[in-house]
Amino acid sequence: MSRKKGLSLEEKRTRLMELFFEKKDFFQLKELEKMGQKEKGITSMTVKDVLQSLVDDSMVDSERIGTSNYFWAFPSKALHARKRKLSDLTQQIEGLKKRKANNDALLVKARRGKDQTENRAQVLKDLALAKAEEAKLKAEVEKYKDLDPEVLKEKENGTSVAKEAANRWTDNVFGIKSWCKKKFGIEGKDIDKNYGVPADFDYLE
């Protein structure tokens, strides 16, 4: 009887992002560990590392409030972050394609003499490095495509649903500000200043 194959890191990242988008709330690590295992099949002891990888990639936000760390993910921000990342990677790939084309031309020129010259060897080396870098960047692009909200289109139902979700998050932000004022005596304007909330922050129309 074969053993059940565990989830890959990318599968865990995708499932944890789904959890954030489905719950639309703020969470502490312990809460995510419990829900991740119960609802998404992510082993609780791995949730912390998966969460940190998403924070490092700017997919999930985190802030320390009082003595606790809270984590959340805005669908709209996640979309923009992935689009920026994909755009950057696409530009890098285009640059590598140009380098590859240049190296191909140099390689053709180098082969004319059919001699194993130092220049030809260097061109071959550069070409191999360019191909390896292109493959690496393409793999990176595929990784972000797996997390693209388009993959979760049925759940988010396009731009209109994302807009509604953003407005619900706006409710959450106002709720947190109200909670912080009641709990810690922190004024809303101080929270805006400390956490970079724009002065015109409001619901989307």
Image (spheres, grey):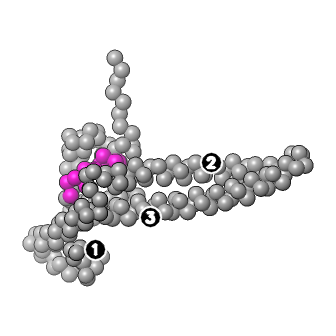
**Pointer 3 local density, CA inside 10 Å: few below 14, some 14–19, many at least 20:** few
Q: Which residues are magenta?
A: 13-24
Relative to the observer, which residue lies in front, 18 or 50? 18
Instruction: Report the disc number at residue 84.
Output: 3
Picture quadrant of residue 77: bottom left
Quadrant holding the C terminus: bottom left
Disc tally is 3
Instruction: Report the disc number at residue 195.
Output: 1
Name the mark nearer the viewer: 1 or 3. 3
Question: Residue at coordinates 43% horizontally, 53% vertically from top-left?
Answer: 144
Q: Could you say whether the residue bearing mark 3 is in a helix, strand or loop?
A: helix
Question: Residue at coordinates 16% horizontally, 76% vertically from top-left?
Answer: 186
Q: Position of residue 21 (x, y in %)?
A: 25, 55
Question: Residue at coordinates 49% horizontally, 51% vertically from top-left?
Answer: 140
Quadrant holding the N terminus: top left
Q: Which residue is mark 2?
A: 132
For residue 19, side relative to residue 183 (left or right): right
Q: Could you say whether the residue bearing mark 1 is in a helix, strand or loop?
A: helix
Could you tell me if residue 54 is visible in this image? no
Q: What amino acid does circle 2 point to?
A: Ala
Q: Position of residue 147 (x, y in %)?
A: 37, 52
- CA gap, disc 2 to disc 1? 41 Å
Q: What amino acid does circle 3 point to?
A: Arg
